[in-house]
Image (tube, helix red, strand yellow):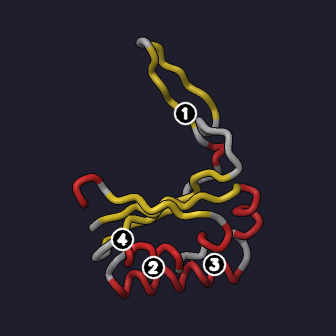
C-alpha cells in the first residue's frame, strides 16, 4: 500500500536545524536505509511557508493570497511517498525519520491503495 508522509515543522526550527550536520547525517542515513529496503518511492523538501501562494476560486472569482491558508505554528515542510505492506510498517518508517524528532509526520494512505 502506498502512503504519503507529510512532514510538518515550525519554519523557524527547520531553518535553525537544516544546517546542523547531525540532522543532515540522520536524513542521509534514513534515505539510504529506506531506499535499501525498497519502501521509498519519492520525496522532497519544500520551501518555507512564507514562499507559498494560496489559490482559491469562489463564485468564479480567483482569490490569490501569499502564504499558507492556515495560520499554524507547524507548516508542511516536505513529503515522502512510501510503499509498505501495512500501516504498522508505515508507522515504523515514519517514526525513524528525523522530522519525527523535531516536528510531526502525518501518514496518509493513497485513495485506492495507490
Identify the residue at horizontal 73%, vertical 70% (top origin): 17
Above or below for 11 versus 56: below
Q: Are marks 3 and 2 in contact (CB under 8 Å)?
A: no
Answer with mark 3 or mark 2, whichever residue precedes in sequence: 3
Nearest to the observer: residue 28 or residue 60: 60
Q: Residues within 10 Å of mark 2 (few under 14, many from 20)?
A: few
Rendering quarter of residue 100: bottom right
The span from disc 4 to disc 3 (Cα, nearest Å) is 27 Å
Left or right of residue 73, residue 106 in this image: left
Measured as percent of width and height from the top left, residue 42 is found at 38, 67
Tell me where residue 45 sits by quadrant. Answer: bottom right
| Residue at the spot of label 3 | 24
Secondary structure beneath label 1:
strand
Residues under numbered marks 4 and 1 in contact, where contact means CB atoms less than 8 Å apart = no
Residue at 40% over, 73% down: 90
Q: Earlier in the sequence, mark 1 or mark 2?
A: 1
Point 71% across, 50% down: residue: 73
Q: Report which residue position mark 2 lands on.
A: 92
Precedes in sequence: disc 4 or disc 3: 3
Per the image, label 4 sits on a secondary structure element best described as helix
Q: Which residue is mark 1?
A: 54
Amino acid at each position: 500500500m502506498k502512503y504519503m508522509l507529510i512532514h510538518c515543522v515550525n519554519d523557524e526550527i527547520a531553518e535553525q536545524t537544516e544546517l546542523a550536520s547531525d540532522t543532515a547525517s540522520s536524513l542521509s542515513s534514513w534515505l539510504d536505509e529506506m531506499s535499501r529496503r525498497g519502501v521509498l518511492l519519492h520525496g522532497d523538501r519544500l520551501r518555507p511557508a512564507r514562499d507559498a501562494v494560496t489559490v482559491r476560486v469562489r463564485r468564479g472569482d480567483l482569490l490569490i493570497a501569499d502564504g499558507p491558508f492556515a495560520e499554524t505554528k507547524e507548516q508542511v515542510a516536505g513529503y515522502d511517498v512510501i510503499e509498505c505492506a501495512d500501516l504498522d510498517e508505515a508507522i515504523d518508517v515514519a517514526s525513524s525519520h528525523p522530522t519525527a524528532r523535531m516536528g510531526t509526520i502525518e501518514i496518509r494512505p493513497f485513495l485506492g491503495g495507490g
